[in-house]
Amino acid sequence: MSVEGTWDLSMSTPIGRIKAVAEFRREDGALIGTARGTGEEVALNDVVLDGNRLTWKQAITKPMRLNLDFVVTIDGDTLAGTSRAGRLPASKVTGERRHEPKTP
Amino acid sequence: MHAQIVLFDGFDPLDAVAPFEVLSAGGTASPGAVTVELVSAEGPRDVVSGTGGLALRATAALDPGRAGLVLVPGAAGRIGDPGDLPDHDAGDGPAQPDDSIPVLLGRTLTTELPVLLKAAMDNPEVTVSAVCGGSLVLAMAGLLEGRHATTHHLGLDMLDATGVHAVRARVVDDGDLVTGAGVTSGLDLGLYLLEREVGPRIAHAVEELFAYERRGTVWRNAGPEPVRF
């Protein structure tokens, strides 16, 4: 399952929903990613794709400071799973891959 | 020492009033050594707490440039289930009577508080203090990265998730950051700050007047690390 591309993510946190745009790409075979949220761009850490199961860690500061652990399953152009802030209970995360216009 | 106690919509009255009274009494016992006022990010206004509509009046705007103490109380509201997640965007949505405590605390992030509190944290002349969920107001604004702090026991996991070394103690002294645990720890925090900043005789005189003795050891990151029992 390919994960490369731009994804619109929505995750639930104790203070409300947070939306982010995540971008995954390969550099020298290694999967890396960045996420853009409210006025910040952060690198995604420990991005691992195992079959269609994708995991990564993300430290956000906007709209609030949180360390998040993601575990999602990719199904075509959608993904669904959980994000977990430290020891807090896991909460739902959903995502949709953007269809970028093909460059000629 | 001048103490500014910061009110925000939905604050917990006891978190604010316990240190207010302790510090005020300390000021009476040591003429002129301690002054206390209630402030808000927006300036003088009636601020409605999260308990039964009780309002307190902030008499000035929080001034992070003023030397002394800045104390942030927590919020009072629905505890909710930690797995109970609000169905609106973070910091968004109108205030609801049943807003959970994390939502009330999170709403402070949309005010001027994060900027003002950062200035207070950056000011070497200011000790920043928090009671209960007040630590989370600071932590969610990203101001306590890598620091040692405590909060209400139900909020410790959340505090930890913001990059703070959360300590399960009643009062945690991390130098220019002194935090208290749940609600009533505001008494202990106030008494400890009096002892640290003014002296043990004044703190003791207030304990005696209030018929209350400070509880627990104030945790500091000092001495040998305890091995597991």
Image (cartoon, coloured by chain):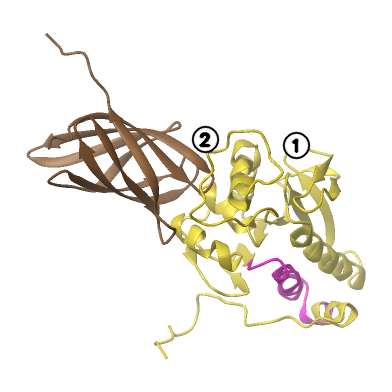
The chain whose colour is yellow is B
Residue B18, percent from left and from top = 80, 65
Q: Identify the residue at horizontal 27%, vertical 45% (top origin).
A: A72
Residue at disc 1, secondary structure: loop
Residue A82 vs residue A32: left or right?
A: right
Residue B158, percent from left and from top = 50, 58
The chain whose colour is brown is A
Instruction: State which region is magenta.
Output: B180-202
The reply to whether the magenta stretch includes residue B220 is no
The reply to whether the magenta stretch includes residue B181 is yes
Nearer to us: label 2 or label 1: 2
Q: Quadrant of the N terminus of chain B?
A: bottom right
Prevailing SS of the magenta stretch: helix
Is B10 situated above or below B224?
above
Chain at numbered mark 1: B
Residue B21 vs residue A50: left or right?
A: right
CA gap between label 2 and label 1 equals: 23 Å
Q: Pointer 2: residues within 10 angstroms few (<14), some, or many (20+)?
A: some
Residue B69, percent from left and from top = 72, 58
The residue beneath circle 1 is B42
The residue beneath circle 2 is B89
Identify the amino acid type marked 2.
Answer: Asp
Residue A75, percent from left and from top = 20, 36
